[in-house]
Image (spheres, rainbow, N blue to C red):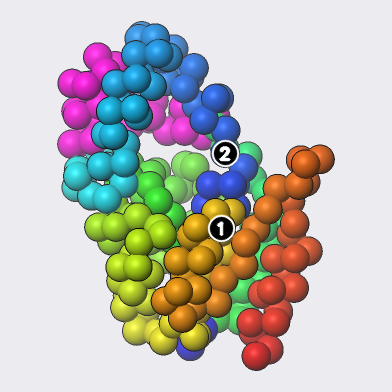
Amino acid sequence: MDVYFFDCDKTLYDYDFHKRLPKLAELGGVSQYRLASSWWAGGHERAAEIGEYSTSEEYLEAFAEVTGARLTLAQWQEARKAAMTPVPGAIAALHEAATLGTVSLLSNNPIPFKDSLPVLTPEIVDVLQDNDLVSAVLGARKPERRIYTRALGRFGVRPEDAILFDDSIANVEGARACGMHAFHFVKRDDGTFDTDGMLDALHAFAAR
């Protein structure tokens, strides 16, 4: 069995934190500076991405305590979705990969992201079939070696039978260091994405 792992942010979906932050500030009634300096600069989001909070409720309660912004999950989703734009060619590649093997997300994100996938990523949730691995569940972030070994273990697959598509060269190199195939997905200076390269890598992996 072959497994095709896809990153989410800046791979399947373009992501702009500078669109998310003002929406969070608006919905939470606190300044962008307070949010960024307390939650993100304070390391709380990173902690959430490695499983500090096991439920969305725990995450949102901690977010409120740290920042003063009390959000519902729907509001959190609204702000997150405002920062995400589908990359049609990458989504098409995921759909094609699903005809060749098993597809899965492999994304550095907290639990609310996993719980919100039907809202945030309606273009891919059906094809994923609950293969929605996020770092918060796996207890490690890319490019740590253990996130790859744990992801592979979920599918019982050898490293050489898996490929990762990711915008981060560090994450790509981490996957390769574990024996996986990997493709560095880039956004060009003109704002377009190398979806042709992604498809070429996908087909080369499938035909190996």
Which residue is at a point 25% across and 57% down the rendered structure image? 139
Instruction: Tell me the element at label 1.
Output: helix
Contact? badges 1 and 2 (CB < 8 Å): no
Q: Amino acid at mark 2?
A: Tyr
Residue 46: image x %, image y %?
31, 41
Residue 101 falls in which quadrant of the image? bottom right
Q: Is residue 102 magenta?
A: no
Mark 1 or mark 2, whichever is nearer to me: 1
Q: Is residue 61 magenta?
A: yes
Whether residue 54 sits left or right of residue 152 in the image: it is left
Q: What residue is pinned by disc 2?
A: 15
Q: Earlier in the sequence, mark 1 or mark 2?
A: 2
Q: Residues within 10 Å of mark 2 (few under 14, many from 20)?
A: many
Whether residue 161 sits left or right of residue 28 in the image: it is right
Disc 1 and disc 2: Cα gap in Å? 17 Å
Residue 159: image x %, image y %?
44, 82
Residue 70 visible to the viewer: no
Residue 107: image x %, image y %?
43, 55
Q: Which mark is residue 169?
A: 1
Q: Quadrant of the C terminus?
A: bottom right
Which residue is at a point 20% across and 43% down the rendered structure image? 53
Residue nearest the viewer, comparing 184 with 27: 184
Residue nearest the viewer, comparing 17 with 98: 17
Q: Amino acid at mark 1?
A: Ile
Whether residue 203 sits left or right of residue 80 in the image: it is right
Whether residue 96 sits left or right of residue 31 in the image: it is right
Against 158, is 153 above or below?
above
Residue nearest the viewer, comparing 36 with 129: 36
The overriding secondary structure of the stretch rendered in magenta is helix
Q: Which residues are magenta?
A: 57-82
